[in-house]
Image (cartoon, rainbow, N blue to C red):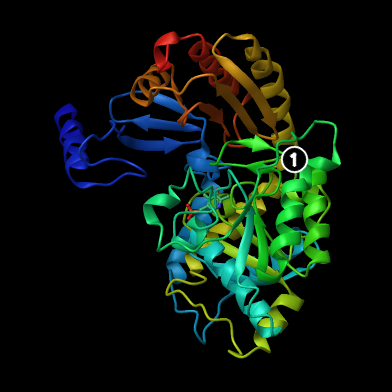
Amino acid sequence: MVKKYTDLLRCDQETLWHPYTSMTNPLPSYLVDDADGVYLHLASGEKIIDGMSSWWSVVHGYNNAFINDAMKAQIDKFSHVMFGGLTHEPAVQLAKTLIDITPAGLDKVFLADSGSVAVEVAIKMAIQYQHSLGQADKNKLLTIKNGYHGDTFAAMSVCDPVNGMHSLFSGFITENYFADAPDIGFDDVWVDSAIDSLKQQFADNHQHIAALILEPIVQGAGGMRFYHPQYLRACRALCDQYEVLLIADEIATGFGRSGKLFACEHADISPDILCLGKALTGGYLTLAATLCTTKVANTISEGEAGVFMHGPTFMGNPLACATANASLELLIKNDWQSQVSAIEQQLRTELLPLQQSKNVADVRVLGAIGVIEAKYPVNMAIIQQKFVEMGVWIRPFGKLIYIMPPFVISSAELKTLTQALANIVDCDEVFKNI
Ligand SMILES: *Cc1c(COP(=O)(O)O)cnc(C)c1O
C-alpha cells in the first residue's frame, strides 16, 4: 500500500499539471484516498479537515448521501444528452429554482460548464446587447483592480492586471478599463470619495463600455477583501446613469457563503447579468450558470445575430443539473443561514484576537469566510506540511491564510481549524522573510 501511493505520487509529479504549478519544480501533492463529511482521508493515513471546501464549492461536505442518491438516480436514467433541440426536467427545474432564489429581475438562464465559461458568456451577452442597441462602440469592459474572474482569455482580461500577469500575454489579451480597487472595508464608515476612481472611469470612457464586471462585496482570489455595500449601490447607480450593464460575478460568493444567499443582497441591488458556479452543485460536479434580465435577453434576441452566440457541448448536462437541484434542496433543508451565522460568530470569536500576533497585518471575517493577512508571504511547502500535521487542509497564497469551511462543519471541527491558524501565525519558519 505504501509503495503504491508513493508510486502514484511520483507518476503524478512526472505527468500532471496542477493549478498554477511548475513541471520542473513541483510542490508536493497529497494523495486523497477517500473523503467523507468535512474530512479528507489521505493515503498516508492522516484524516484532515477541509478548511477550503475544495475552493468554495463543497458546502455540504463530501460523500453526502442525499446528493449521492440524487446523482445515482439520474445516472440510471441518463447522464447526458445534447441541449440543442432537446431538454430535460433537471435543467428546467434548476432554471426555475435559480430564478426564484436570485435577486429580482434575473429571469433567463444560460447553463455553462465552468465558472470561467460563465464569465465568457456574461461578457458575450453584454457585447451582443450593446451591439443590438446600435452601440457597437460599447465593446470594452470596466472592472476594479484585485479582481479574479477565471483563467480563460476574456475572463483573464478583467482579472487584476498584475496578479493576472497581463504583461505575459500582452498583444493577445484584450485591454479593458480598470478602476482602483475599493479600499473601503465592509464595516468602515462610508465616504463618497471611495468611488471616485470608478466614477472617473465612467465619465472618461462610458461611450466604450459595455459592462462593469466585478465580484460583489468579496474580492476572492485577488486579495480576499470585503468592501462596503454602498460601493456596490454606487456601481448600480453609475451603470444606470451611463447605460452600462452590471455583471455580478458571484461564482465564489453565491449560495450563502458571505452570509447572504447572494452577496448582492448586502447592498440590496440586482445586477443585469449574474454568474454562478463553484457551490452550485455542492462541489460534486462542474456546472455554472449565467442569468440575465428579460431586457438583456430580448435585446440580444432581436439584434443582428437573432440568437445568443454560444452553445457548449455539455451545456445543461443532466447529471450536473440533477446534482445542483439536490444541493440547492439541501441548502434550504439544512438552513444554510443558521449554519453560516454560527460559523461567522465562531470565526469572529476565535480569529479576530489573532490580530495581536506580530506576524499578522489584518484579520477579516464575513459569513463563512475567515481571512488572516500576514505581514510576510508564506512558504507553501512548509506551511502545507505543518497544516497537514495539525490535521487540517488550509491552502494559503502569498500573504493570505484563509478558510471557507463546509457549512456542515461542527463547532469542534471548526475549532480545530482556527486553532491551527492560531498556531501557524506564531510559527516564524513558515514566513519567508523572517
Ligand atoms: C473561481 C472563480 C471563477 C472561475 O471559475 P472556474 O470554475 O475556476 O472556471 C470566476 N470568478 C470567480 C469570482 C471565482 O471565484
- In the figure, 395 relative to 285: above or below? above
Q: Residue at x 55, y 80 (%)?
A: 87
Left or right for 429, reference 304: left
Residue 261 appears in the picture as rendered: no
Mark 1 falls on what kind of element?
helix
Rendering coords of residue 163 (x, y %): 48, 42
Q: Is 331 placed left or right of 19 in the picture?
A: right
User: Is 277 rendered above or below residue 430?
Assistant: below
**Quadrant in which the C terminus is drawn:** top left
Label 1 Cα crowd, 10 Å radius (few <14 / some 14-19 / many 20+): some
Q: Point out the image quarter for the N terminus.
A: top left
- Which residue ends up furthest to the front in the rendered image? 204
Judge whether 122 appears above or below 237 on screen. Answer: below
Q: Residue at x 63, y 54 (%)?
A: 143
Q: Is residue 365 visible?
A: yes
**Rendered residue at 57%/24% (across/down):** 373
* Front position in the image: 63 or 428: 428
Relative to 4, say whether 275 is above or below. Answer: below
Q: Specify whether tag 1 is near ligand 1 (CB below 8 Å).
A: no
Q: Position of residue 108 (x, y in %)?
A: 69, 73
Residue 252 image offset from top left, x and y in percent: 59, 47
Q: List the residue tagged with mark 1.
A: 337
The quarter holding residue 93 reads bottom right
Asked which quadrant contains residue 374, the reply is top right
Under mark 1, the amino acid is Gln
